[in-house]
Image (spheres, rainbow, N blue to C red):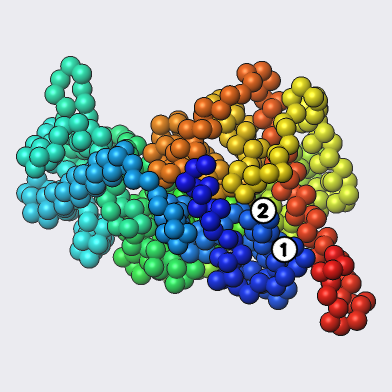
Amino acid sequence: MSVIDEVKQKTDIVDVASQYTTLTKSGRNFKAICPFHSEKHPSFFIYPEQQSWHCFGACNTGGDVFSLIMKKEGLDFGEVLRHTAEIAGVTLPSRAGQATDKEKNDRLYRINELSADYFHQLLLTSPSAEKTRSYITRRGISNQSVNAFNLGYSPNSWDSLRQYLMERDYTEAELITAGLIIEVESAASHDRFRNRLMFPINDAKGRTIGFGARVLDDSMPKYTNSPDTPLFYKSSCLYGIDLAREAIRQQDMAVIVEGYMDVIAAHDNGFGNVIASMGTAIADRQVSNLKKLSKNIVLALDADTAGEEAALRGIIFENSLGAEVKVAILPKGRDPDDVIRESKDTWQSLINEAIPVMDYTFDRVTAGLDLNTARDKSLAVDRLLPIISQMNDLIRKSHYFQKLARLADITPNQLQMIFKNKAAERNHGKSFNKGNKVAAAPSHNILTSNPREEYYLSLLLQHPELKTLSSSIMPEYFENSENREIFNAYLSTENISSLKETLDDFIREHLDSLVAKSLPDKNLEGRLSDCILLLKKESLNLCVLLEKKMKLRIFLSTLLRPGLNLDYIL
């Protein structure tokens, strides 16, 4: 038994949940008003036998005791494990490797901090930084923002930073690991950033983890970032998050822009809830980090093709958020920096008038179509129906289903028939036969493991080529917190090595067991497809069963005498 399993077995989810809401016995289970959103009728259920929970209301998600605490307290997995272990009286093993990794990472944090201060002081005082200072003034960046964002200047030198850090007893190997110098086989290593305006990138705790850099001439690329390091993963980072987190909490809204300058302009003008994705490719890990602060996300991306594509990808994040993503429509040819500096009122209006990303998708998909023709109506259905089908929120899904039916000038029943026919075509030949069916999870040990989830993850981890076939799986399908954490991290990383660096130390043991699991080497796509269908079916069946039970309870309460305990009937 792993230490995570031991902590789970010594932690009663009923005791934990009762700290957040008032539980009422409902047969063998418990029900309550959901602690995560306002509601009049209980939609939050605790299942003691499985040590799991599920909200059938606005959250439409569930999991184990760890995910419950993570969602309520806004903590990551490692923080919850350590806190829960202390309460449960479980001593987490002290591993030499952990201590070594922490020491190495602490030195990398210090290297980045020293480098950021070095660049910042050069920007403020060096004669060679005059062109950079002029650029900052020309862009309208205040001295306050220069200091708040710790902007800097990297000199036009091959090894000035390298020498500066090595004089402070840091090794060349450490500087290469930090991504600050580049190793060259046939020559001496040299500084990565030269003659650039420097943007230190901090994590939510304010620790510098990497750098962005902008050239000051016409050379390309205009912007470059640190490479992936043990501290820095571009797909997990949000520029300005350390300065924006309190404003995001207070305003219960996060505005995502693309660039460093967009963020600085926003903060310079009083819009403190703005952060950047450092490019148009917003990743699931970034959204997962944001939803601890707020589920209300507005995408304010440049009005170009790349920005449009990034906004359209925002649809996939709605399921994990459990909330609607919105898009602020910027004027053609203008980026947030331009709009904000020209008129703060215009910017505020654009944010206030942001439209749901699904409506934006309808507008973009149909923009070039003639919906008076049968051909283009069919194209609209082909492009929009698969997107709508991925939505978890049944009410919103129904809304856009009807909207598409009106657009195509057909009835919802006819559209439903089209959907079923297309689904049948996709699933043709993928029958559940004895040769590729995944074994059902055993009834025992459900507290600490979920064989089907683990089988699915093992397939993905051992066969990366299958990743593209898993776009329809959502984190909410995983009840086990370790499996959910691994899946979330897997979506944002390229290989096992990067995945390990992303995960908490104690989950790595679970990851290793999944990678080492013995699997058949035939019909991999068929096995993965079966797993996907079964995971979806399990999630759907649970939701449908309890939704029917809740409706039956409401119906019976109108017929039977007041005060009768319906739990004995249901």
| Left or right: residue 28 compared with residue 243 | right
- Residue 483 visible? The answer is yes
Q: Residue at x 70, y 76 (%)?
A: 40
| Left or right: residue 361 compared with residue 196 | right
**Could you say which is closer to the camera, residue 56 or residue 287?**
56
* 163 up-or-down from 150: above or below: above
Mark with earlier residue (1, 2): 1
Residue type, label 2:
Gln
Which residue is under mark 2? 50
Quadrant hosting residue 567: bottom right
**Mark sitting on residue 29:** 1
Where disc 2 sits, the SS reads loop
**Residue 488, image x and y in percent?**
52, 44
**Could you say which is closer to the camera, residue 377 or residue 478?**
478
Quadrant hosting residue 220: top left
**Residue 266, image x and y in percent?**
37, 62
Measured Cα–Cα span from mark 1 to mark 2: 10 Å
Q: Residue at x 31, y 65 (%)?
A: 268
Residue type, label 1:
Asn
